[in-house]
Amino acid sequence: MRKNIVAGNWKMNLDFEKAEELMDDLAEILDEKKPEKCEVVICPPYLYMELAVDYAQEANFEAGAQNVSSFDNGAYTGEISAEMLKRLEVKYVIIGHSERRAYFHEDNKVLQAKVRKALDNNLKPIFCCGEVLEERKGEKHFEVVENQLKETILKLSKEEFSKIVIAYEPVWAIGTGETATPEQAQEMHAFIRGLIVEAYDEKVADDTTILYGGSCKPGNAKEIFAKPDVDGGLIGGASLKAKDFAAIIDSF
Ligand code: 13P
């Protein structure tokens, strides 16, 4: 059976002191709550990765990275390799976030290479997909997500695919305050699960965790997580406040 996950994507936020404070607060809250219905993951900027891994050893959360290089180690200025993350004992890595696709021109080929490096180094990819507003308005959203997945992770072997977590993040809902309705999320998640059945089988589809992301907050998480094909969330803004993030974790 698949597991629920609530992951916080901190993006490029917080100075060192604030990051440490947030990890500290979160560790304390989760120590009291001991979340049993989901795994909690935090994905801070690289600079705070080692700190997050140190916390994760004791606290009830896991550490994830926001990105990974599509190359191995070597002359790639500014990059961080999957092997470096593995050595640090990072567990997850976000790949294919719409901000990486849009601002850093990461296409399906690059993303597939990143997934490969992550899997070769025992990191679990949280692979993002999702349509922009024009595509939703033009009723192209299913086609867009299908292509994003078919050109990347649905090419993996069954065994490799079993390590993947998917995050559906409609781009029009990210950081805008506009959330997909629980019905819109469910509809897309069920569609994605259908694609997994087609590519592999029912069991693989049943075992795949599919997260929703996009303006998920304490006020709407419960309704969204209640949908049968939504297995948690990838949280941006609300993961920067320990209490809000904890309330979302409590929403199962
Ligand atoms: P917000 O929760 O801030 O909309 O961001 C979602 C997101 O992009 C998580 O990866």
Image (cartoon, rainbow, N blue to C red):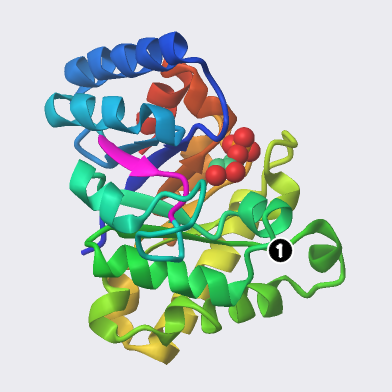
In this view, 246 is above or below 79: above
Q: Amino acid at mark 1?
A: Glu
Query: In percent of the image, x 40 and y 68: which residue is there?
Result: 115
Q: Position of residue 47 (x, y in %)?
A: 41, 29
- Residue 242 lies in what quarter of the image? top left
Query: In percent of the image, x 36 and y 65: which residue is there?
Result: 72
Q: Position of residue 77 (x, y in %)?
A: 51, 50
- Which one is in front, 109 or 40? 109
In this view, 142 is above or below 25: below
Report which residue position mark 1 lands on: 131
Residue 3 visible in this rendered orientation of the protein: yes
Q: Position of residue 57 (x, y in %)?
A: 14, 30
Which quadrant of the picture is home to ligand 1?
top right
Q: Which element is circle 1 on? A: loop
* Residue 63 in magenta stretch: yes
Residue 218 visible in this rendered orientation of the protein: no
* Residue 50 in magenta stretch: no
- Residue 18 lies in what quarter of the image? top left
- Residue 1 lies in what quarter of the image? bottom left
Q: Residues within 10 Å of mark 1 (few under 14, many from 20)?
A: many
Query: In percent of the image, x 67 and y 49: which residue is there?
Result: 180
Q: Position of residue 177 (x, y in %)?
A: 72, 33
Which contiguous range is marked in magenta?
62-68
- Which one is in front, 230 or 65? 65
In this view, 201 is above or below 249: below
